[in-house]
Amino acid sequence: MKRLVTILLVCIAIFLSGCGIANETAGQNQKQTKYLDKAGFQKEYRDATVHLELPPAIFFPDEANTGGAQSFEEGCGVSFAQQYWIYAWQVEWLEQRNRDQEREVAAINMLKNVIPECEFMREKIDEAGRRLYYEYIRKAELGDPSGFQHEVSVNPMKLERALDD
């Protein structure tokens, strides 16, 4: 019986030491996640907004709504800015369709040709999400607003607007 217990303990020790090595190796192959405080998140957000063109009379809020969170994974500020930007162009297309053809065309062109190249769409949205987005574009080009109507209703954001639009 004593020999069986010894063998069992040796097996457990070997197993556990192997797990430690596997975890060390896995940790070396993974990127180290960096975190930002609220000020760092807001700076990242503001820096990202400089490069994003919004529809007429819509502007970025001075600060992104953090919902009270104090710690953010690096890249969240950029993602938030890009989500707001995408949402603004979806709303622009919905509001301008059958109303202002020039703005309607500008919005669908932005949604079809520019937005798919942004970091958020390329790296944060999975393949199924991208396929769904392209289906919304296809529908919009045929005059069907249902895809973007659904998107803005399930992911609502408050857009900052100029008073005269």
Image (cartoon, rainbow, N blue to C red):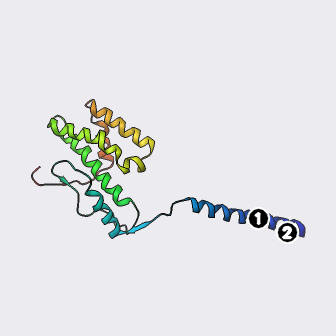
Residue 1 visible here: no
- Residue 6's tag is 2
Q: Say which residue appears at 25% left-offset and 57% top-offset.
A: 50
Q: List x then y, in percent, for residue 59.
A: 20, 55
Q: Is mark 2 on a helix, strand or loop?
A: helix
3D distance between C-alphas at marks 1 and 2: 12 Å
- N-terminal of the two: label 1 or label 2? 2
Disc 1 to disc 2: CB gap under 8 Å: no
Give above or below for 110 relative to 62. Answer: above
Give above or below for 70 relative to 88. Answer: below
Q: What residue type is labelled 2?
A: Thr
Give above or below for 1 relative to 81. Answer: below
- Residue 14's tag is 1
- Number of residues whose C-alpha sits closer than 10 Å to that of mark 2, classed few (under 14), some (14–19) or many (20 or more): few
- Classify residue 136 as left or right of residue 5: left
- Number of residues whose C-alpha sits closer than 10 Å to that of mark 1, classed few (under 14), some (14–19) or many (20 or more): few
- Classify residue 137 as left or right of residue 2: left
Q: Say which residue appears at 21% left-offset and 44% top-offset.
A: 92
- Residue 111's tag is none
From the viewer's perspective, is the residue at label 1 or at label 2 nearer? 1
Q: Which amino acid does label 1 sit on?
A: Ile
